[in-house]
Image (cartoon, rainbow, N blue to C red):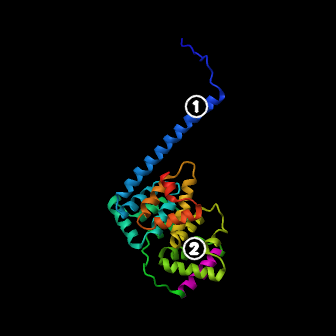
Amino acid sequence: MATLKVSSSVPSPSEDAEQLKSAFDGIQCFCLFLFLLVFWTRAILLWTLEPGERDALLVNEATKRWTSSNQVLMEVACTRTSTQLLHARQAYHARYKKSIEEDVAHHTTGDFRKLLVSLVSSYRYEGEEVNMTLAKQEAKLIHEKIKDKHYNDEDFIRILSTRSKPQINATFNRYQDNHGEEILKSLEEGDEDDKFLGLLRSTIQCLTRPELYFVDVLRSAIKKTGTDEGALTRIVTTRAEIDLKVIGQEYQRRNSIPLEKIVNS
């Protein structure tokens, strides 16, 4: 029968505390190593893909998850140009032998399906021309829908998914001029637990001020218990050659710390 031997020298409380601290420091270092390994492995994988192929992969992964994946689908649909989104749809056809619209429709239900399928199938006009008469009309329509809390209205969704981004900005500027507050402020008056309303706010932010949307996503990812390396790698790799510098400047302005320090720490 085994016997248990107790050491004759019992460590002091301070020695116990020091040994525990060393153990926890070791665990923290190992966890940091694992995070960096996962982060850079994932980043390298995404960087090796063409932008359209990368977006196709991100969308496909999002249709297989149920946590925050609607945000990823909306993000890809709203922050890419019409040509970039078309390339993503073509890459999806080639890689997965079906359409983005098909998988997004299968993944979503109800109002989420109505909004997201419209967004991923969009092909917006990319010019700078703006119709101010139309902006006035649609600003009035949107105000009526928000006032009545008809956030899932088909005309509201049609405007968000088909109008050019300059036209949408003109409409929302007119909305603010007419009603004395930004449209996002008006939408904050809804139920904060309404996930569709949250997605609608993110959609508008992506279409009008994408750098602010990405700053919010980064801040949320970093503040989580266990940094969300998926969001970090997605933003770093997809925005590196587009507006990551602008995102970094906005992040530092709002958080008083350089984004580079967060990514590399």
Given residues 10 and 243, the one toward you in this image is 10
Dividing the picture into quarters, in which one does residue 175 lie? bottom right
Q: Is residue 53 left or right of residue 79?
A: left
Q: Which residues are magenta?
A: 133-146
Q: Residue furthest bottom?
A: 133
Q: Residue furthest left?
A: 94
Given residues 213 and 131, the one toward you in this image is 213
Q: Is residue 114 visible?
A: no
Q: Which mark is residue 229?
A: none
Identity of the residue drawn at 55% across and 34% down: 23
Quadrant for the N terminus in the image:
top right
Q: Which residue is mark 1?
A: 19
- Tag 1 secondary structure: helix
Q: Which residue is mark 2?
A: 153
Given residues 214 and 254, the one toward you in this image is 254
Identity of the residue drawn at 47% across and 62% down: 73
Q: Position of residue 162 (x, y in %)?
A: 47, 76
Q: Name the N-terminal-most of marks 1 and 2.
A: 1
Residue 178, compared with residue 79, is above or below; it is: below
Q: Position of residue 209 (x, y in %)?
A: 53, 71
- Tag 2 secondary structure: loop
Q: CA distance from mark 1 to mark 2?
A: 61 Å
Amino acid type assigned to the residue bearing label 2 in the image: Asp
